[in-house]
Image (cartoon, rainbow, N blue to C red):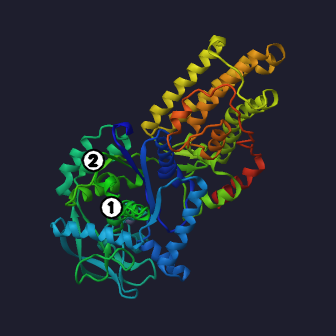
Amino acid sequence: MSSANFKQTLVTSALPYANGEIHLGHLAGAYLPADIYVRYLRLRGREVLYICGSDEYGVPITLTAEKLGISPKELVDRNYASIKKSFGGFGMSFDNFSQTSREIHSETAQAFFTDLHSQGVFKQKTTEQFYSSSQNRFLADRYIEGTCPKCSSEEARGDQCEKCGSTLDPTELINPRSVLDNSPLELRETTHWFLPLADWQEKLEDFLGRHPEWKDNVLRYCNGWFADGLRDRAMTRDLNWGVPVPLADHDGKVMFVWFEAPIGYISATREWAAQKGEPEAWKNWWQNPDTRLVHFIGKDNIFFHALLFPAILMAHSEDYILPDNVPANEFLNLEGQKLSTSRGFAVWLPEYLEKFSADPLRYTLARNSPETRDMNFTWEGFLARNNNELGNNFGNLINRVFTFIHKYFEGQVPEWSEEMMTDLDRDALKEVAADLEKWAGHLEKFEVKAALEACFHAGQVGNRYFDESAPFKSRKTDLERCGHSLGVIIQILRQLCLMLSPVVPFGMEKLWGWLGMESDLWAGGWEEGNQIIPSGRQLGKQEILFPRFEQEAIQVEIDRLQEMLGE
Ligand SMILES: [Zn+2]
């Protein structure tokens, strides 16, 4: 359903894992599209709350912390601060960005677990799992290695053999050992709490059946899992870094991260409410059927957001809203190759922000948004998008118009009127108005790429109008006509500002000010942005919004990535 059918919209972006920095693949998948959507809603004056935070538990965090010789908490706090800073520089406009290692999250997740447990939702099962005596811990599948029973490769992992591609259960491995220290492993009994997802399959199928509008990729994955039949999933783990399981005598057990991390959206909302002094205000979002809940994620998280988390919400004894949409994106490739964080083949946000500003990257990623298939980011493409599109199509037009008005009309919107309208004027205004309408229609459906195409077209119309109405010529022959054309084109810039603002907010906040707009762009600026800018209004002094990049600036980046590929 469209956002207009609901009183308010609660938007979440997948919680980034606090084991490293944010890279371009993350941004293109779960962050930029969400931020564009949220900014669009704020522009329209709709009620919206945007929630995120870092996901901080699990084995990889403990391993990195051990390597660095610091505690897991120190590691996640350090990474949280860095991620938060990069997101700020990139213009992510969260209402709250929290951490799952905070007390409010443990409380919230434990209350959820207790509620489900007391209703008898979980199945308790005792199984045998590999235990490392040298490390005094049970090991997750990916930390177990051994000889493949099918092809005899000695480096098969607990979940699969890379050599022959077989999917494995760790107990099938011959001579299982720990990846961490090569020590032999023994099987030990352990008890866990399972969510019997099969019991929820029918309800989940009904739930998805009510959302035929969801993206094809999401429905396709879910229908595949339904066809296989949903199975029991352990919601607890034998680990020491996680949210402790809130049951008597179950020391050393924590919640499965995919049980507690999505509940992090709720804890972060509770924290937001507490911070503004209304600790119960979170309920007005999560337990209010007038709220539309939208989860932005990458395609690797579909199972957890479209099936597991809804099942957990359904199972709770209180009424929680379920997601109205889960717009999952495909992946972003880099220079034609898969991103690899372990090999360092990625572009990291903090490094990017040291050299460039946020707008050109936001624009490039939005233009290449991996909505229906994997997309590719290249530095050459980045240069071209910045110079040819942001610079030439939009920036130059804005600059030319403002320069002209400041030079010949004392910076005031010249006289222009209905009586002076020609077909050229009317057609240009009509085309841009149609683009604006298309743009809004696409954003309602999370179609960032198509929305930007409409916006780009409006920029082309503006340029064509400027060239054809030619105020630079009429200035010498017919000053009145010259002023009128500039008055018309200021209206086009006003609409371009609306269309570009969610994508390049830093630049458009400036333009909004130069146009002499009085309302807050992000609190319903749409209304003023759709009103005529009258003759006589004093305009602000402009500056270059989107400076050109030279080849040298990106060549360093290309060389660095090429070197890595050559290795
Ligand atoms: Zn094998």
Look at the image and tell me whether residue 346 can be seen: no
Residue furthest out toward the right: 476
At label 1, the amino acid type is: Glu
In which quadrant of this rendering is ligand 1 seen? bottom left
Gap in Å between the C-alphas at discs 2 and 1?
Answer: 16 Å
Residue 125 versus residue 353 in the image, above or below:
below
Of residues 331 and 291, the one nearer the viewer is: 291
To which residue does mark 2 refer? 289
Side of 233 relative to 68 (left or right): left
Look at the image and tell me whether residue 243 can be seen: yes
Q: Secondary structure at mark 2?
A: loop
Of residues 254 and 415, the one nearer the viewer is: 415
In x, y percent, where is residue 482? Answer: 75, 18
At label 2, the amino acid type is: Pro
Q: Is label 2 or label 1 in front?
A: 1
Query: Looking at the figure, which quarter contains the N terminus?
Result: top left
In x, y percent, where is residue 508? Answer: 62, 41
| Residue for point 53% across, 44% down | 522
Q: Earlier in the sequence, mark 2 or mark 1?
A: 1
In x, y percent, where is residue 157? Answer: 40, 69
Classify mark 2 as within 8 Å of ligand 1 or not, answering yes or no.
no
Mark 1 is surrounded, within 10 Å at the Cα level, by few (under 14), some (14 to 19) or many (20 or more) other residues, namely few
